[in-house]
Image (cartoon, rainbow, N blue to C red):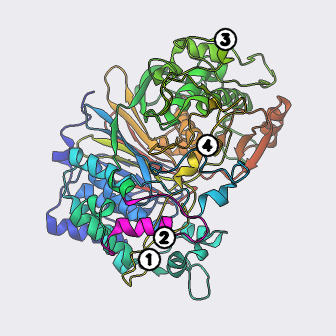
Amino acid sequence: MRPLRRDLLARAPILSPRVARLALLLALFALHPVARSQQKGDDKPWNGKYYAVATANPLATDTGYAMLRAGGSAMDAAIAAQMVLTLVEPQASGIGGGAFLLHHDGQITESYDGRETAPSDVDEDLFLDAQRKPLGFAEASIGGRAVGAPGLLRMLELAHGQHGRLPWKQLFEPAIALAEQGFPVSPRLHTQLSEPNALRQDPVAAAYFFDSAGQPWPVGHKLRNPELAAVLRRIANGGANAFYRGEQADDIAPAIVRKVRGHPRNPGHLSLTDLAEYEALVRPPLCFVYQARNSPDSKPRRGASATRDVQICGMPPPSSGTLALGQIFGILARTPAATLPMQRKPPKPHAGPLPSAEWLHLYAEAARLAMADRALYVADPDYVPPPGPSWMALLEPDYLAERAKLMNLSPRAPRMKEAPAGIPMSVERNSEDQGLAPYAGLGRETGARPRLAPMPAQPEYGTSHISIVDGQGHALAMTSSVEAVWGAQVMVNRGQGLVGGFLLNNQLTDFSFVPRGSAGTDVVIANRVEPRKRPRSSMTPLLVFSRPRGELLFSGGSPGGASIIHYTGKMLYGVLHWGLDVQQAINLPNFAVLSASNDAPVLLEQGRFPPATLKSLQRRGHTVHEQALTSGLQAIEVLGNGRLQGGADPRREGTVRGE
């Protein structure tokens, strides 16, 4: 693919080391705005010329911006910003969790897999009780049982070795300074501390997050984390090995293992060997060509034609996000969806624009079909082969056309009674498999041809997203996570007399709690627990390119568990089809369908859709639930004249900053 703008780094303002350090301090402590910056709640996009950073917290955004201004790459800015997120947004992501990252260097797009892995001594019954019934989510997730080997730091170190410009050590300085000097507790951090959680049951977390009366620190309280500062300093000086290896009492790895295996109520299996042998992976990205057609009521933006081809690139499995989004978009393209206008002037008090009820019906049907395939097929590709020559079998045009035929496209037609998983055209149908695809050697079983059962729906949570474009046109999209809010709700501290620490993930709960289907023990669930396996994820970082020139158009993503697929899809559809700018697309009301099952509701963001929309969907047979759908979308779009436009989700605390 062609470089975006090779001359911009020379034209962008690069500061001397002394001035760069001053700019960094100004950015971190907000003493003076040194760049054009979008503020939380802005309804207009950020606009710039050279580079941009979008993250979930202003301090992280400011840190990434300062690294770019000091001459760093997009990768440098992402690492520095993520270390700050570990401190200021610990409920969502951090060094105790994992991430997926897409990077484009102007020519090549790569995907980095920093997903957690299951300990080596677990088995598929990890989340079953003595009666072989699945545990409740809280029972499974709080404590050590669900902690996987964290992948974030190994992944970032691997990516930095290939795409970093600034020294590794320098990237940790802002987070260390903030941890030592303190940062103001944000409204979102305070709110989530005030909601029911198990942090008070962990002595380390209780001493850090709450005052002597057991109350969460108030908004604006300067919170210091000297233990995290010491941990980050070790990693800055010793690289990722300082986190993953060590046997001394004050080393990080033994402290992690002690916390996991020594949990008083729910111990886990993680070992020093699991940490030392963790590997981050570079995988080929999953890319597909998509034809975007403007809806009749939208005007082509930036002089673009009414129809244009783009290439959408995302993470392959174990992420399910790109596959599901590609299936939803591909199925919708074979329906009247693209010809349906938006509600540009919805009834008061609803602020437009809004998707129409007819479009939402078609989307929900396409999503149910995609969720059916996701539940049956998608898992760690090192354990589960794709249903065909490659995972692209699930995106074959003929296959998507067959899937679309399952939908009744007549006006006011009811929803599908069933949304079954399909069998791609390239997979031989076998009558003995009762419609399910056989796989030779599935997982670690050799010489067997077990059949797959769909994974039952279960909760997914978490995460944070970063999008960056630097002055050389290098770009990345990274989604990181500790899974549920507060992860496993245990805080690691090495016991050296310093307050604070870092939280661990509960990512193993993204595996299926039930390992096998009801048809018998030979019918397995692809995403069941296995040693060293990576759990399926919904994280959907995306990079989008023009066709055929291959120029970067878009970087984006969101937190939100299984809803990530729909949040990210909504944003991208709004830009590609409805002619919205990136902030307008982010601001659109959220919607989601999380399962293919007949009783799975259509989720609509509470208070954002008119009653008539709900009634129209209900008349078609949909169950509709209104609830808070708190996305955290971040995105940067490259406009036709080479300028940048960014957006951040007003539902959280994200901002965009750059030059």
Camera-near label (4 vs 1) is 4
Q: Which mark is residue 491?
A: 2
* Quadrant of the rendered image containing residue 252: bottom left
Instruction: Say if 329 sits above or below 63 in the image.
Output: above
Q: Which mark is residue 512?
A: 4
Q: CA distance from mark 2 to mark 3?
A: 51 Å
* Quadrant of the rendered image containing residue 41: bottom right
| Amino acid type of the residue tagged 1 in the rendering | Gly
Residue 473 lies in magenta, yes or no? Answer: no
Q: CA distance from mark 1 to mark 2?
A: 8 Å
Camera-near label (4 vs 3) is 3
Q: Which residue is mark 1?
A: 500
| Amino acid type of the residue tagged 3 in the rendering | Ser
Q: Which mark is residue 186?
A: none
Nearer to me, 621 or 535: 535
For disc 1, the neighbor class at 10 Å (few under 14, some 14 to 19, many from 20) is many
Query: What segment is highlighted magenta in the picture?
Result: 248-272
